[in-house]
Image (cartoon, rainbow, N blue to C red):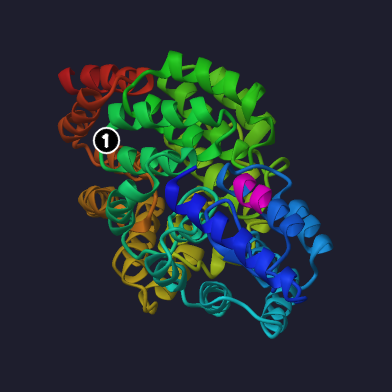
Amino acid sequence: MGHGLASRLSNRSLLSNSLAQIGLEDPLLTLDSAGQQVSTDQEAASRYDLAVRMTLGLQRGVLEQVDSVLEADPGFAVAHATKAALDFEQRDLRDCALHYHSALESLARGATAREQAYVRAVGQRIHGDRLAYRAYAEAYPEDPIGLALAIPTIAFSGAYDSPIDAWHRLDELEPLHRDHWWFTGLLAFARVEQGDFEGAAELADRSLREEPHGGTAAHARAHAYYELGEHAEGLRWLDGWLAQAGTRCLGRDHLAWHAVLHDLGLGDIKAVLERYDRDLSPWVLEGIRSLVDGASLLWRLDLMGIPDRAGDIAKLRAMAGRELTEPSTAFSAMHAALADAAAGDVAALTRLEQRCRGSAMPAMADFGAPLAAALAGFVRGEDAEVADTLLELFAASRATGASRAQCEVIEDTAIAALVRSGRVDDAIGVLTARLDRRPHAGDRTLLGRLGQTSSC
């Protein structure tokens, strides 16, 4: 325990003793595990600490744990606000509204300035201000849950228009949080996106040694294995983690998608289809997760000439919800466009283009709209017209918040357009550059096939 926290705990004890001596009750101020004052008793604070730890580790059962906190103290404003924030991320808008209003009502019994700011930030986010969590995390960088909500991960949409700004912010906060497993896991993910794959692997391993169940660190480790081209080792590690420490991870579905990428990297199509049927089909996944992981995989398979599961796209789109037709972020718009392309639905792509073009969000207008238009052209067979556009969009795709691995599907589409338009040598150049970055059996097989076509 740091000296600052120890001092605060000592002062807290002195305050309680002094109040008791003069016959006054404790004013319901307790320190949480981050050393912050919370307006509740020790029992509720301890339960809330566990809820925060589960959230930071991407563990299932967080909502139930927050319910346990509120059973101990129904007037705990921060707990109500956290439940509202988590409900919002999981699209449970009714429960979200109920808990947000309970949080506002609970503030009336007294709250610290930080607690008031936290409830206010949750409310602003619910009402459409995507940057609200960023402002809160800037003002109160010691709060782990605030930082977790602000940084884009598989758990939270984040509060940064540019993911690069989020990674820079983590670098700035490293002196404050470097000894915490949850922060090290976040930093590992940032290192992946910054291109430091070996550094990411080291940070993720360090985080997992302290907290083996940490979902963010496991996610970063999966990315590092893929970007380093260590497909066999990465698949062994990921399957082992999912079967043991990761059994209660909220990100299991997405990590199964990462396992499929390793299957593709090894050229094992049979394993890809088996894992898809078990973990990623629309009969297994629902909502945004199905849209993101299922649609991108179905489109990859279609590009590879493997249409075995193409019939699933109709069910996937039917259950994708509003993010398919009214995406709230450029990340969602990208995957909605892939789903529409996989369905061969040019009309839907045209509507999506128009919607993105009218958005006030730069990434929606500058990336989402032209991507929908380019994919519509690809579906129509206008390969010569869209090939270079798709390559340009791939280069700009990181602005969506999508990872390197997720954005590769756009490059895959560009390669297909180059091949179909007769520019085989250009497609070979793109594939060769990608293989120079990391080994990949699937890419190697395609390169060999294109090499034979080029020499004919």
Which residue position holds label 1?
419
Mark 1 is surrounded, within 10 Å at the Cα level, by few (under 14), some (14 to 19) or many (20 or more) other residues, namely many
In magenta segment, residue 52: yes
Question: At 67% across and 65% down in the image, what residue appears?
Answer: 16
* Element type where label 1 sits in the image: helix
Residue 116 quadrant: bottom right
Magenta extent: 49-54
Question: At 43% across and 26% down in the image, what residue appears?
Answer: 205
- Horizontally, residue 142 falls left or right of residue 67, namely left
Q: Position of residue 210 (x, y in %)?
A: 51, 29
Question: At 23% across and 54% down in the image, what residue appears?
Answer: 389
Q: Main secondary structure of the magenta part?
A: helix
Q: List the single residue furthest toward the right.
A: 71
Q: Position of residue 174 (x, y in %)?
A: 32, 47
In magenta segment, residue 38: no
Residue 412 quadrant: top left
Q: Is residue 266 visible?
A: no
Q: Amino acid at mark 1?
A: Val
Number of numbered discs on residues? 1
Q: Position of residue 10 (x, y in %)?
A: 56, 55
Residue 18 position (above or below residue 109): above
Question: At 53% across and 53% down in the image, what residue appears?
Answer: 34
- Horizontally, residue 155 falls left or right of residue 368, namely right
- Horizontally, residue 106 falls left or right of residue 137, namely right
